[in-house]
Image (spheres, helix red, strand yellow):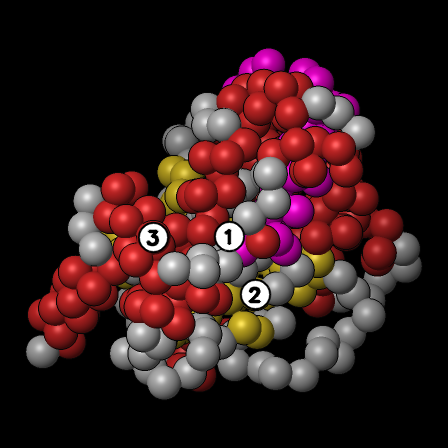
Amino acid sequence: MTDNASVPVYKLYGEHQQWATPDMIHCETIAARSKLHNWEIKPHQHHGLFQILYLREGNARLRIEERDHPMAAGQLLLVPQMCVHGFQFAPNAQGHVITLAYPLVRRAAGAAGEALLTLRSPYLHLLAADDASAWLRGHFAALDREYRGNALHREIVLESLLGAALAWLARHAIPVAPSATHDSRGMRHFAAFCTMIEAEYASHHPISDYARRLGITAAHLNALCRQASGQSALDLIHERMLLEAKRQLVYTSMTVSTVSYSLGFADPAYFTRFFKQRIGMSPKQFRNGAQQAFGARTG
């Protein structure tokens, strides 16, 4: 547990300053940053950034929110903004990390970029042993080479390579319902709603308020949410609130009452009932279980 109010938020891990480059993209190898931190990237978040990590060789232990997952060679991880994630890499780990500003994802990939930005949690994908996946592997290497160079028309080539890679990921690597992918306006509405949730999940606005600001009906918004995610609009808001509650319980020392107030609940008892009904245990039980799990791993 930590006494900090929240998990660290970085532009790039370990750096608190703005990027020194005007690019809205940053490319580096896994080893370049990880070996500076003894191959461990502790749990952190990025604001306004979408990250792609491709593990070409070696293995890693991946922390997503409060859980650990193994990561093997050939897997890639898509990480949307403000998701808690961390890594423990094997010293022989090799691969690429591509970090993108959200406006660049939209500009370079259009509707494919919007589809990627509807991801609400990190997503792990295993590249198959086929020609399509081999193409993406080569694309990561080409992106890295172009980023490090200073050739004529570098920005145009970078954005072209990036757009193609993002389109591949939207086609092959994310679970988006077919009905949602064919309705670009609906996808834009859903993406805008996800952005609203991220900024306002603790405000407890009615669904009709979000729909009004999007220029659609509440029924239409619910239909779009079910097409894209299989959940209702309210389910998505509650999911985000619960995710934040878990983060605060696992990564901070705030009392349950303080957590409840930070999430917009006027009554901590109501928050406890809300949490237990959906998670199957009280906030205190969840925190104690996380502490025991972490102690078992580090003891």
Identify the residue position indicated by label 2 in the image. Answer: 46
Label 2 and label 1: CA atoms lie apart by 9 Å
Give the residue displayed 31% in from the left and 68% down from the top.
Answer: 256
Give the residue displayed 51% in from the left and 52% down from the top.
Answer: 79
56 is higher (above) or lower (below) than 8: above
85 is higher (above) or lower (below) than 217: below
81 is higher (above) or lower (below) than 190: below
Say whether marks 2 and 1 touch (CB < 8 Å): yes
Main secondary structure of the magenta stretch:
helix
| Picture quadrant of residue 89 | bottom left
Identify the residue position indicated by label 3 in the image. Answer: 270
Give the extent of the magenta segment.
Answer: 177-202
Specify few, some or many for label 2: CA neighbours under 10 Å numbering under 14, 14-19, or 20 or more: many
Q: Is 274 part of what is drawn in magenta?
A: no
| Picture quadrant of residue 244 | bottom left
Three-letter amino acid code of the residue under disc 2: His
* Res 298 seen here: yes
Give the residue displayed 51% in from the left and 42% down from the top.
Answer: 237
SS class of the residue under badge 2? Answer: strand
* Res 175 seen here: no
Three-letter amino acid code of the residue under disc 1: Val
Label 3 and label 1: CA atoms lie apart by 32 Å
Residue 281 horizontal/vertical position (percent): 18, 50
SS class of the residue under badge 3? Answer: helix
Q: In the rendering, which numbered label is found on residue 79?
A: 1
Say whether marks 3 and 1 touch (CB < 8 Å): no
Q: Nearer the viewer, residue 274 or 3?
A: 274
Residue 268 horizontal/vertical position (percent): 34, 61
